[in-house]
Image (spheres, rainbow, N blue to C red):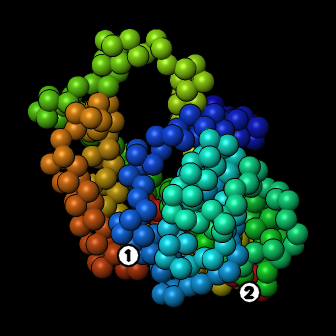
């Protein structure tokens, strides 16, 4: 099915508005040592060991995971968190207040092709898991270039690679097929059956249901490393660098997520959660020390890009 630009934007708004309140819990978003370490590992791979930017703009900030942890790590001093979803931005405001950053964090409801800022307004334009949602990527990269001061940088992480995404279908498929056995072994109830039995299914808000039905429509790109390089160079950036990260960790993670996808979250035992979490960190470490930088970026699940405005 071919969707228009407006269809893609509408799907993103509805899905992310519906997902906002439970998004952090679903993806294990954390603002303690775990979250700060995970974000620091990513920034160092592209921006160096001690990056520092006075004023930054995050594209598609979601609930603020990347911005707020970068702020905790001292990478950015002031940030504008932009998103197409009002629901997500409300969560950013709550989290910024909780962390004591309200005076340094501004939220902006906008699309990624045109921002209400003057030329050369920012030192860093960045995002996490956002480029693959944007329908007009060249227009977006052109806008990033306009917004940056000379010497400013772009940094985007968590973008699915075309090959990595194709490879990840295998653990996802295996997990879905084995999910009934996994639920039976751990005595985890099926989420949909539980909702039907207690009447929650009929009571759910129509907008919530419609939004979650859009999830399969919001991911519109998977990239080859050269695709990201071309967008950046066409916009005028130089010192373009695309790297891959996480191969075995994502196979492990997607297999477990597929097992858990149809289970009732409160039934999942803590021993399983500890296994899944510690296992993921172990495979992430293996990828970092043994595979990243040695294998082609294209085979990893995630791509990251950094570039500088001359």
Q: Is residue 87 left or right of residue 49?
A: right
Circle 2 residues within 10 Å: few <14, some 14–19, many ≥20: few
Q: Which circle marks residue 151 in the picture?
A: 2
Residue 39 screen position, x and y as percent? 46, 69
Residue appearing at x 48%, y 44% in the figure: 23
Q: Which circle marks residue 292 in the picture?
A: 1
Q: Is residue 166 left or right of residue 208?
A: left
Dot 2 lies on which element? strand
Residue appearing at x 30%, y 17% in the figure: 193
Quadrant including the C terminus: bottom right
In the picture shown, does residue 180 fall above or below 172?
A: above
Q: Earlier in the sequence, mark 1 or mark 2?
A: 2
Quadrant including the N terminus: top right
Q: Which circle marks residue 20 in the picture?
A: none
Furthest residue in direction right, as rendered: 118
Residue 246 screen position, x and y as percent? 37, 65
Whether residue 40 is visible to the viewer of this picture, yes or no, is yes
Residue appearing at x 70%, y 35% in the figure: 10
Whether residue 223 is visible to the viewer of this picture, yes or no, is no
Residue depth check, mark 1 versus mark 2: number of the one nearer the observer: 2
Dot 1 lies on which element? loop
Furthest residue in direction left, as rendered: 185
49, 170: nearer the viewer: 49
Distance of label 1 from label 2 (alpha carbons): 27 Å
In the picture shown, does residue 303 fall above or below 294?
A: above
In the picture shown, does residue 62 fall above or below 99?
A: above
Circle 1 residues within 10 Å: few <14, some 14–19, many ≥20: some
Q: Is residue 269 left or right of residue 297?
A: left
Residue 99 screen position, x and y as percent? 51, 63
Residue appearing at x 36%, y 69% in the figure: 33
Picture quadrant where residue 152 is located: bottom right
């Amino acid at each position: 099915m071919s969707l228009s630009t407006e269809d893609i934007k509408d799907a993103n708004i509805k899905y992310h508005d519906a997902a906002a309140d439970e998004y952090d819990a679903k993806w294990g978003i954390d603002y303690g040592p775990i979250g700060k370490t995970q974000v620091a590992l990513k920034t160092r791979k592209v921006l160096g060991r001690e990056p520092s930017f006075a004023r930054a703009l995050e594209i598609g900030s979601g609930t603020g995971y990347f911005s707020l942890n970068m702020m905790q790590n001292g990478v950015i001093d002031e940030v504008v968190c932009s998103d197409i979803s009002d629901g997500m931005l409300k969560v950013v405001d709550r989290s910024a207040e909780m962390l004591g950053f309200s005076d340094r964090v501004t939220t902006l409801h906008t699309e990624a092709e045109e921002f209400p800022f003057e030329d050369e307004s920012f030192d860093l334009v960045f995002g996490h898991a956002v480029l693959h949602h944007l329908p007009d990527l060249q227009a977006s990269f052109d806008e990033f270039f306009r917004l940056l001061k000379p010497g400013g940088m772009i940094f985007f992480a968590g973008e699915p690679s075309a090959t990595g995404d194709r490879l990840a279908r295998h653990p996802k498929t295996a997990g879905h097929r084995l999910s009934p056995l996994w639920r039976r072994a751990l005595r985890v109830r099926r989420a949909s059956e539980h909702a039907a039995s207690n009447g929650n299914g009929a009571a759910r808000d129509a907008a919530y249901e419609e939004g979650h039905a859009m999830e399969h429509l919001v991911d519109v790109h998977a990239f080859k490393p050269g695709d990201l390089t071309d967008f950046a160079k066409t916009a005028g950036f130089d010192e373009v660098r695309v790297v891959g990260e996480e191969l075995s960790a994502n196979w492990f993670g997607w297999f477990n997520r597929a097992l858990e996808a149809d289970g009732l979250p409160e039934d999942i035992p803590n021993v399983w959660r500890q296994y899944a979490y510690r296992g993921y960190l172990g495979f992430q470490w293996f990828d970092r020390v043994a595979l990243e930088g040695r294998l082609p970026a294209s085979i990893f699940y995630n791509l990251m890009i950094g570039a500088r405005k001359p």
